[in-house]
Amino acid sequence: MGSSHSALAHDLTAAVGGDKELVAFPTNPLYEPAYVKPYNTTIPVKPAAVAYPKTTEQVSAIVKCARDAGLKVQARSGGHSYGNFCE
């Protein structure tokens, strides 16, 4: 992950107003079970980060960070999907 992870972590944390509780990264030992929560374990997924925005401005800033980093954004909902695309 190196410097690109640190730049992404910095930018995403700034996007949520500096609230570190609103964003999680793979460096967290509980990242997968606590934040990613895969439904179908036969299809591995490892998101670059999981964010919990509280405002539309935060959503917009997160999407811009992802675009700038060349990453895709996948919204999560209250359900689940076969391909682990949402919770």
Image: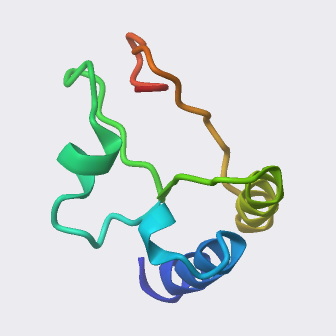
Image spot of residue 72 (x, y percent)? 67, 45
The quarter of the rendered structure image containing the C terminus is top left
In the rendered image of this protein, does residue 22 appear above or below residue 15? above
Counting every numbered tag in the picture gives 0
Seen at 42% across and 69% down, the residue is 21
Is 60 left or right of 86, judged from the image as shown?
right
* Residue, far top: 82
Figure quadrant of residue 71? bottom right
Residue plotted at (39% across, 24% down): 84
* Way the structure is coloured: rainbow
The residue at the point 62 percent across, 71 percent down is: 12
Relative to 34, residue 61 above or below: below
Question: Residue 39's spot in the image, x, y percent?
Answer: 27, 21
In the image, is 75 to the left or to the right of 65? left
Q: Nearer the viewer, residue 87 or 55?
A: 55
Residue 22, x across and y down, in percent? 50, 63
Left or right: where 73 falls relative to 32: right
Q: Position of residue 63 (x, y in %)?
A: 76, 54
Quarter of the image holding residue 57?
bottom right
Quadrant of the image containing the N terminus: bottom left
